[in-house]
């Protein structure tokens, strides 16, 4: 059993949210679902979703980060999580229609912006700061100085 489990407060719609997440992430299991709560396992990360009403709101201060290996994976997850009312933000962040913040990032990002060659890393960082949805080819070109 997972020792620490994120517990996400929703106004309403946890059953719909669980179904959305299962459609976006192929390795997702809905472990339980009812009107008040749902427990989902997304690629081994268990989340509890709770219909708590309008008292508390989601904020970008808490986000779920998703590492993507390919541009196709980034594009698919980005589009699916924005569908029906989500909002894009900067640097790979978005808010789904339930108000949950996600970071959809290429797995290569850490090695680009964390590279010991600060000039290359800074070029990649500057390219990232101009993006909404991450673009792997653009990040790599900036890193390479092209």
Image (cartoon, helix red, strand yellow):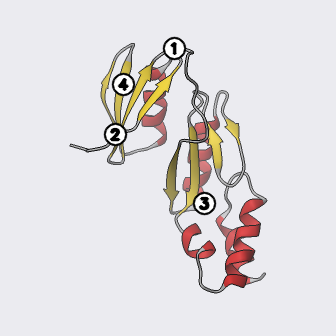
Work out how far the residue at label 1 is from the one at label 4, CA to CA, in angstroms.
15 Å
Residue under numbered circle 2? 5
Sequence-wise, the earlier of marks 3 and 4 is 4
Answer above or below: position of 118 versus 40.
below
Which corner quadrant of the image does residue 87 belong to?
Answer: top right
Instruction: Report the disc number at residue 38.
Output: 4
Q: Closer to the camera: disc 1 or disc 3?
A: 1
The image shows residue 102 at horizontal and vertical percentages of 57, 44
Q: Closer to the camera: disc 3 or disc 4?
A: 4
Identify the secondary structure beneath mark 1: loop
Q: Quadrant of the N terminus?
A: top left
Residue name at image x 65 percent, y 52 percent: 92
Identify the secondary structure beneath mark 2: loop
Instruction: Report the disc number at residue 53.
Output: 1
Query: Do the CB atoms of the residues marked 3 and 4 lie less than 8 Å apart?
Result: no
The image shows residue 69 at horizontal and vertical percentages of 51, 63
Work out how far the residue at label 2 is from the one at label 1, CA to CA, in angstroms.
20 Å
Sequence-wise, the earlier of marks 3 and 2 is 2
Instruction: Report the disc number at residue 13.
Output: none
Q: Residue furthest bottom?
A: 117
Residue name at image x 57 percent, y 15 percent: 54
Sequence-wise, the earlier of marks 2 and 4 is 2
Q: Residues within 10 Å of mark 1 (few under 14, many from 20)?
A: few
Query: Do the CB atoms of the residues marked 3 and 2 lie less than 8 Å apart?
Result: no
Residue under numbered circle 3? 71
Along the viewing direction, whichever of 131 and 118 lies nearer the viewer: 118
Work out how far the residue at label 3 is from the one at label 2, CA to CA, in angstroms.
29 Å
Sequence-wise, the earlier of marks 1 and 4 is 4
The image shows residue 116 at horizontal and vertical percentages of 59, 85
Q: Residues within 10 Å of mark 3 (few under 14, many from 20)?
A: some
């Amino acid at each position: 059993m997972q020792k620490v489990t994120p517990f996400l407060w929703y106004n309403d719609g946890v059953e719909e949210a669980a179904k959305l997440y299962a459609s976006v992430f192929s390795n997702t299991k809905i472990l339980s679902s009812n009107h008040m709560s749902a427990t989902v396992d997304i690629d081994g990360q268990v989340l509890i979703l709770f219909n708590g009403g309008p008292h508390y709101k989601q904020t970008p201060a808490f986000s779920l980060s998703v590492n993507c290996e390919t541009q196709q994976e980034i594009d698919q997850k980005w589009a699916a999580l924005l569908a029906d009312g989500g909002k894009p933000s900067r640097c790979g962040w978005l808010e789904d229609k339930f108000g949950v913040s996600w970071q959809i990032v290429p797995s290569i990002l850490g090695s680009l912006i964390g590279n010991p060659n600060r000039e290359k890393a800074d070029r990649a960082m500057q390219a990232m700061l101009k993006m909404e949805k991450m673009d792997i080819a653009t990040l790599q070109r900036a890193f390479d100085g092209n």
